[in-house]
Amino acid sequence: GDVEAATASADETADSDDGPTSVVSEASDDGDGPTTAVSQVDDADTDDGNAVKSAVRSVSGDGQAAANRDQTLATPATRKAARELDVNIDAVPTDQTRDGQPYVDESAVRTYAEAQQAAQAADAEAVSAEGGAAGTAAEAGGAGAETTAVETGDGERREPYRGVRRSIGEQMARSRREVPHATHHDQVDVSGLVEAHERLQPLAEERDVTLTYTPFVVKCVAAALDQHPVLNTALDTENEEIVYRDVHNIGVAAATDHGLVVPVVDDVDGKGLVELADEINDLVGRARERDIERSEMQGGTFTVTNFGAIGGEYASPIINVPETAILGIGALKERPVAEDGEVVAKPTLPLSLAIDHRVIDGADAARFVNTLKEYLADPTRLLLE
């Protein structure tokens, strides 16, 4: 497996007795999570620099730059528009207030979104005009200059904290702050999985597909979710509802040189192992090359992160909100196992399931992991599904 970590986002709402009339945002409103980041604009000395900065300043009529509030009042319709346009509602400039709090309406959100898009386009054009790898990175990922380091001469090096890195950091902080995480750890003997992989790998190679363990895990997760649907949910805090999803769209977290991304494999139930392997390899590969569409990193219902590809056994993964669970996979290797009164070496797989305790109880997590272990121990059980 060649996938590694994941991140998240969430909202809080405030409703009146007559229904939702205004909403307080406790943190930045970044939609479906850390898939891409809005390019941040420098005061770079380029011919296009003024155009870029002008686009950012034009967000509001009075020339205000992007805001950085902790709380914003907005109607549910406005917040919905912000999510659809991938706008951080706390960054939208405004001089309006309601009950002493900053207030943003839908027109301000749309104006800000248009200015963001203009700034991104101008930024990419300005950087790409300089040529080289930086231009390519800016066009592909919108973060061309974010790794530019500054030597301070004091025995340290500083890099800008922005773009994808800042987006990831903000989403992780939000998830930890807003979601009560609980993590269930377990370990499973995967002798049957190893045998199935060894048997099917040559057949996959005949179709020019590299078959790793990841497609097996994703397929087993989908089968277990079918029996434990509470883990395939989203928490809609705005409407105070738990949303059960019928489809299993599994996010596969991947580490890239420009940050962590989570490509999503849609409709896992409707795909075979070879098809899943081919799709996962393609998505992760293009994510690392910054050649993946934002739509391909949205709509996930559950996330799998394989930190064991680097090393380690257990972790406490951070949930990719609005999802309510994430499964961490440790390193698959032989470990001592008690069997018939003797200690023998068996290939085992450590599991770390983090849940949103507002939605999922510890007993639900344990039952899900027990079911998942049955599929991982004997993947042929999938044929019965």
Image: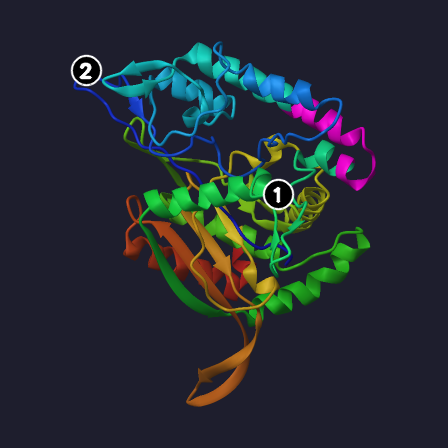
Task: Residue 141 in the image: state x and y as whole percent.
Answer: 67, 36
Name the colour scheme: rainbow
Report, in whole angstroms, how far the alpha carbon at label 1 lies from the one at label 2: 45 Å
Whether residue 142 is visible, yes or no, is yes
Identify the residue under disc 2: 18
- Residue 271 image label: 1
User: Nearest the camera: 136 or 316?
Assistant: 136
Secondary structure at badge 1 equals: loop
Tell me where the magenta segment starts and ends, as one range: 120-135
Q: Quadrant of residue 289?
A: top right
Whether residue 384 is visible, yes or no, is no
Task: Residue 104 in the image: state x and y as whole percent.
Answer: 38, 16
Secondary structure at badge 2 equals: loop
Horizontal side, residue 142 vs residue 136: left or right: left
Horizontal side, residue 328 vs residue 293: left or right: left
Q: Residue at x 74, y 27 (%)?
A: 46
Q: Quadrant of residue 331?
A: bottom right
Task: Residue 91 in the image: state x and y as whole percent.
Answer: 45, 26
**In the rendered image, the vertical position of residue 210 relative to residue 262, given as above or below:** below
**In the rendered image, the vertical position of residue 99 relative to residue 150, given as above or below:** above
Q: Is residue 245 magenta?
A: no
The amino acid on which the numbered mark 1 sits, given as a three-letter code, is Lys
